[in-house]
Image (cartoon, helix red, strand yellow):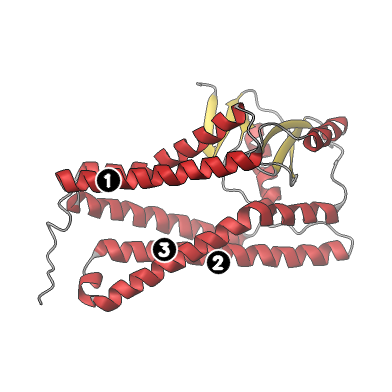
Amino acid sequence: MKNKVKKVINFRFDRYKGTEIKLEKLAAKGLFLEECGAFLWTFRKGEPKNLKYTVTYFSEGSVFNPDITDNQQTYFDYAKAAGWNFVTQFNQMQIFCSEADNPIPFETDEKEKFDNIKRCMKKSFLPSIIVMILVFMFNLVVQFNSFQLNPIDFLSDPSRLFSVAMILAVVIYEVYFLLDYFIWCKRSERSIASGGECAENISMVRRIVHLIFMSFSFVSFGYFLYYLVFKISWFGVFLCIIQMPILLIVFWLSIKYLKKKKASATINKVISFTVLIIADFAYLAFIVLFTIKFGFNVGAGSDYRTVV
C-alpha cells in the first residue's frame, strides 16, 4: 500500500473536462488513477508520464452490476481500437487513458455525448440531490417549528443554531448545483445547435462558491464538535462521528458481497439499501440504549434555563 495514494476528488458528470485536466496533471507528477469512488479516488505512484485522459458515460453502468455488461464490453473494445486503455469506472462514468500525444477521440458525436450525460444525471445524481434538498428543507421546517414553540431556548442553544446554519448552507449549495447544471445544459444545447461541442463547465465562480461552502462547512463542523465535547462525553461525540463511516462500510460491503454472488443489479440495490436502513435503525437504537444506561450529560453545563 506504500505506492498507493488516496485523494478526495470532487467530480460531477457535467464537469468532465476539469476531471480530465486534473488527472493529466497528476499523471505528470507520477500519480496514476487506479480506482474511483464517490469521494475517495485511488492513485498509484510511478514515474511521471504525459498521459491523456478522457471521461465518458454509459447509461448501463452501475455499481450494482455484477459484471460489465455486453454492451459495455463492446464500448470498451471500440475505445481500445481507437488507442484508449480502460482505467476504471464509477456508476455510468468510464475513464480511459492514452500515451499518444494526440489520441484519436472515439466520441465524435457531441449531441450523443450530451444526451448520455443528461441520461446519467437523471439516473443517478439529480434524484439524489432533489431528495437531499427535500430532506434538508423538511429539517428546516422542523427547526422552525421548534423555534416557534420556544424561541429563547432555541436561540440560546449553539448546537441548534449551528445545525440550522449547516442545513441552510447545504440547501443553498445544492440549489446552486442544480441551477449551475441547468445553465450548462442550455449553454451546451446552444453550442451543439451551432455545430460546436458541449460547453465547458470550468467556472471560476463555481470554484469560489465551492471553496466558500467547504470552508464554512469545515469551520462550522469543527466549532460544533468543540462545543459538543464540553456538553457531551468524548465517547458520545465519537459515537456520533463514526455513524456515517460505519453505515457506508456496511452499505459497500453488502454491494460487494452481492456482486460476488452474481446477484442482479436490481436485487443488489434493493437488498443493499434495505441493509443500510436496518443498520441505521440498529445504530440509532444502540445510541439511545447507551444514553439511557450511561447518559451523556447533555445540557449539564448550559447557562440558560427556561423559567415557567
| Residue 152 rendering spot, x and y as whole percentages | 20, 75
| Residue 63 rendering spot, x and y as whole percentages | 62, 39
The residue sitting at 86% across, 59% down in the picture is 196
Pointer 3 or 2: first along the chain: 3
Which numbered circle lies on residue 175? 2
- Of residues 45 and 14, the one drawn nearer to the viewer in this rendering: 14
Can residue 291 be seen in the rendering of this structure?
A: yes
Up-down: is 4 above or below 75? above
- Of residues 163 and 106, the one drawn nearer to the viewer in this rendering: 163
* Residue located beneath label 1 in the image: 287
Q: Amino acid at mark 1?
A: Ile
Q: Quadrant of residue 154?
A: bottom left
Can residue 205 be seen in the rendering of this structure?
A: no
* Residue located beneath label 3 in the image: 167
Distance of mark 3 from mark 2, alpha carbons?
12 Å
| SS assignment at label 1 | helix
Crowdedness near tag 1: few (<14), some (14–19) or many (≥20) residues, C-alpha within 10 Å: some
Q: Is residue 199 left or right of residue 31?
A: right
Distance of mark 3 from mark 1, alpha carbons?
23 Å
Q: Amino acid at mark 3?
A: Ile
